[in-house]
Amino acid sequence: MQIKWLALRSSARAIMGAAVLSALLITSGRAEEVKAGDLVITQAWSRATPSGAKIAGGYLTIENKGAAPDRLLGGSGDIAGKVEVHEMAMNNGVMTMRPLDKGLMIEPGKTVKLAPGGYHLMMFDLKSPLKQGEKLPVTLEFEKAGKVTVSLDVQAVGAQSPASGDHSGHMDMKKM
């Protein structure tokens, strides 16, 4: 009986090890890192949009590994008429969203995350709906690093992070 138990434990460990290795390989296969000067851009993603939607958000992480600040000024892409940097914030109990006319500062040695409910890219006048599984090329414009093309991985409608199936906090894009 003890031999069967040891064999079962050994098999279970092998299966768990294979599962962990597979997860690491899948995650690292999806994680695209783009370098532009002292900036490292990762986790670029967006959400799928319903048919007829004219706006979408873009999210990513920017790390400044240099000694000088840089600024994300905006962007462009074939999918949208205009790409701006926006901020969502609570002001006196009211959620507000506004463009950052002077861009978003990325201080040296710091990481800035563009995510739902905070800083984000706003893509206006979409030319077609964003579909889950697509890779959406967008060119970001930085004050010092210049123009940098990244690929946004389109996740499910309502996703809260890259490769997330969480639909909480879903915005109705048809009403915007």
Image: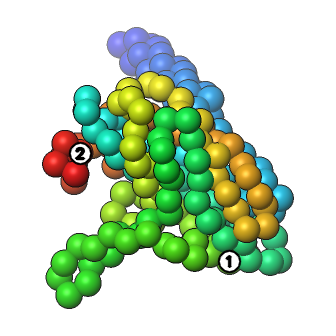
Residue at the spot 27% in from the left edge and 78% down from the top edge: 90
Locate the N terminus and report the quarter of the image it occupies: top left
Residue farthest toward the bottom in the current orientation of the protein:
92
The answer to whether any part of residue 44 appears in the image is yes
Q: Earlier in the sequence, mark 2 or mark 1?
A: 1
Q: Which amino acid does the dot numbered 1 rest on?
A: Glu
For disc 1, the neighbor class at 10 Å (few under 14, some 14 to 19, many from 20) is some
Q: Indicate the position of residue 135 as horizontal and vertical percent values.
A: 53, 29
Lateral position of residue 166 relative to residue 99, left or right: left
Numbered mark located on residue 173 in the image: 2
**Is 118 above or below relative to 162?**
below
Q: Which mark is residue 107?
A: 1
**Secondary structure found at label 2:** helix
In the image, residue 84 sits, relative to residue 13, either above or below, namely below
The quadrant holding residue 91 is bottom left
Label 2 neighbour load within 10 Å: few <14, some 14-19, many 20+: some
Relative image position of residue 160 (x, y in whole percent): 34, 49
Instruction: Assign a secondary structure to mark 1.
Output: loop
Q: Is residue 150 above or below residue 92?
A: above
Rounded to the nearest whole Å, what is the CA distance between mark 2 and mark 1? 32 Å
